[in-house]
Image (tube, grey):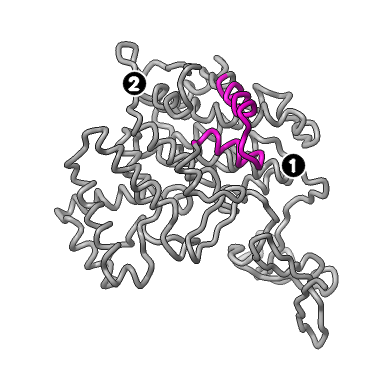
Amino acid sequence: MPKTALLKLDEKEISLPVVVGTEGERAIDIGKLRADTGYITFDDGFGNTGSCTSAITYIDGEVGVLRYRGYPIEQLAEKSNFVETAYLVIHGELPTQEQRARFGRLLSQNAAVHEGMTRFLQSFPRASHPMAVLSATLNSLGAYYPHLATNNHQHDLEHFDEAAAIAISKVRTIAAHSYRVSHGLPLNYPRPNIGYCENFLHLMFSEPYNEYIPTAEVAQALNLFLLLHADHEQNCSTSTVKMVASAGANLFASVSAGVNALWGPLHGGANMAVLEMLKSIHADGDDGTKFIAAAKSGKGERLMGFGHRVYKNYDPRAKIIKASFYKALGSLGIKDDPLLNIAMKLEEVALSDDYFIARKLYPNVDFYSGLIMRALGIPENMFTVMFAIGRMPGWVAQWYEVAKNPKLKIYRPRQVYVGPTQRDYVAMENRK
């Protein structure tokens, strides 16, 4: 017999179904609560609300588990790569050799942007924030590919593979072009004979007189960064993508909205905040010792890049990216960087000091990812753009879950109104 929860309300007992996920997660289905009782639930910020069912990503923050489609993130980081993982996240299974080849061809064929879009990119003021450029340009894809952006889910799903490849491939080209434009540099064009990450670095840093060829360690560090960010359940930007998709919006409009949500400093700006913290410590002439002491006393600034809202244990992504980070540093010949030295001091203390261990303030993925981006030469105002490139497969997959749902209803949260009660209009001359 299915489990139910019993709610006692106004001396009446209401039986509510219990939904159990494949990993044993339990939720109380309150879908008919308002219709049956006139009540709604109140959950400020949706922290205890399951907004949907999803088969993409599983997180257990208490023990530090992250799985894409059932595959542990540790196995994917060791054995897979970003492009294959993107296919897995979107389609639900690891690709066969033929499927992987076809997906790769779609990415290569859709890497370049239309010349009209190039002029659009060049029309932005050079001081424009790259996230503003990225969001606007992704949204404009609907104008360049109107047959993929009909705002009719049934039609758009028939061309989903093409639209998904366009979003995943072009996001890196748009990002790199925006960087080149903002620095007054000539644009580079994608090369069909190199990998996804190598292509991005080529688009960013190659010059007519000097083609940028990354070392294997550098390419792998970027590959892992993107793979580790491919999806992360129903976070703010992903929920935004699904909210917009629920209105029937096309893929490009939906992921553009996701970029805007990610741009918020409380969401996508954590790795940049780590760098700002390190620069502030360095400017004070501190090696991190005074900063840590102030943080422990409760009188200092917030320690950025440690702990996580979801993970109450060590962020599993941090363990993976840490090793790749050190390999990349060695490959780049970076040995004595003042900010790096401070970061390593903070890391050493956080992993050994009882204060941090007791509070489970372990370094998270943002602590290392900001350092990796800096080491690769990515400017700080593009850190969140890099996050968006990595998260694109997850946004695409989450949009697909909404679009293919035959029972789709537009997402429409309720509220508890706390404004003025009814009152009468007051003419201008009588207002005080």
Q: Decide which of 141, 50 is in the foreground and name it.
A: 50
Residue 425 shown left or right of residue 350 in the figure: right
The structure residue drawn at horizontal position 78% and vertical position 65%, both measured from the top left corner, is 31
The location of residue 88, given as percent across then percent down, is: 60, 40
Does residue 99 show up magenta in the picture? Answer: yes
Q: The N terminus lies in which quarter of the figure?
A: bottom right
Q: Which residues are magenta?
A: 81-108
Residue 403 got which mark?
1
Q: Residues within 10 Å of mark 2 (few under 14, many from 20)?
A: some
- Dot 2: what SS? loop
Q: Residue furthest right?
A: 36
Residue 133 got which mark?
none
Tell me which numbered mark, 1 or 2, is placed earlier along the sequence. Answer: 2
The structure residue drawn at horizontal position 42% and vertical position 22%, both measured from the top left corner, is 203
For residue 236, above or below residue 221: below
Residue type, mark 2 in image: Tyr
For residue 55, above or below residue 42: above
Tell me the residue that label 2 is attached to. 212
For residue 26, above or below residue 160: below
- Please name the predominant secondary structure of the magenta segment in the image: helix
